Amino acid sequence: MLTSNSYEGIDTYAADLIRNKSRLLIGKAGLTESDRPDLEQELMIDLLERMKRYNPAKAKKTTFMARIVERRIASLLEMRFAQRRDCRLCKASLNEPAPSSFGESLERGDLMSRDLHPSVKTGEPVERKSGDMQIDMEAVIASLPEQLRDLCERLRTSNMMEISRETGICRGTLYYRLSLLREALQEAGLKEYL
């Protein structure tokens, strides 16, 4: 299916590349045919912004375009497969009505009903549960090595790129430390913070 996106005035190689790459992504990472026009636009905008940095002395234009599009796709897939957004973990669609405790279906506006509220399922008030979680989190952070504690504190206000710039530590090292931090939280049973 062709999308209604117009690529008038755009390099034909770039338009064809983006159309083909977005077509190949449909059916992966929870992307559907209805996501295709948005995906194409996302890729095209990113490519057009980065074309300003193209240097013919370093690579052919087509190679540069292909790398830019491939890297953007990798970033999009990485975001979609992040643990809290992973489409593979989704058990039900938000478009389907959820059953209530009486066997009836809830309307969309009733999704935060008493039956679905976390405090009803656990029997604990939400405030107490989150307070206990905070105490556990502080204890785990206090037991971490200095490097991981520092990373944890910095992640509260900055992303990995900013932390790398501030500290002078390469992102590869920071991502390795992040994996160690995630392991420590998982071992402590604090999966909610991953």
Image (spheres, helix red, strand yellow):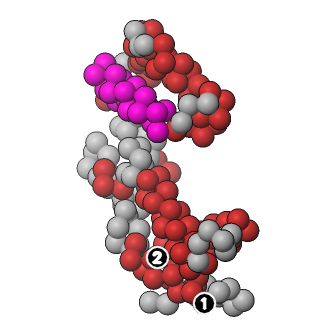
How many marks the image carries: the answer is 2
Q: Quadrant of residue 123?
A: top left
Q: Type of residue at label 2?
A: Ser
Of 59 and 80, nearer the camera is 59
The mark nearer the N terminus, 1 or 2, is 1
Q: Is residue 191 left or right of residue 21?
A: left
Q: Is residue 177 magenta?
A: yes
Of 83 and 64, nearer the camera is 64
Q: Quadrant of residue 26?
A: bottom left
Which image quarter is the C terminus in? top left
Determine the residue positioned at 52% across, 24% down. Answer: 151
The answer to whether mark 1 and mark 2 are in CB contact below 8 A is no
Q: Is residue 68 positioned above or below 140 on the image?
A: below
Circle 2 crowding by C-alpha within 10 Å: few under 14, some 14–19, many from 20: many
Indicate which label's residue lies in the foreground, 1 or 2. 1
Q: Is residue 16 magenta?
A: no
Residue 22: assigned label = 2
Determine the secondary structure under disc 1.
helix
Q: Quadrant of residue 49?
A: bottom right
Report which residue position mark 1 lands on.
Answer: 12
Determine the residue positioned at 61% across, 78% down. Answer: 61
- Image: magenta residue range: 172-194
Does any portion of residue 51 appear in the rendered image?
yes
From the top left corner, tell me how far across and down residue 113 is, in percent: 43, 40
Q: Type of residue at label 1?
A: Thr
Determine the residue positioned at 46% across, 33% down. Answer: 173
Q: Is residue 70 positioned above or below 118 on the image?
A: below
Does any portion of residue 193 appear in the rendered image?
no
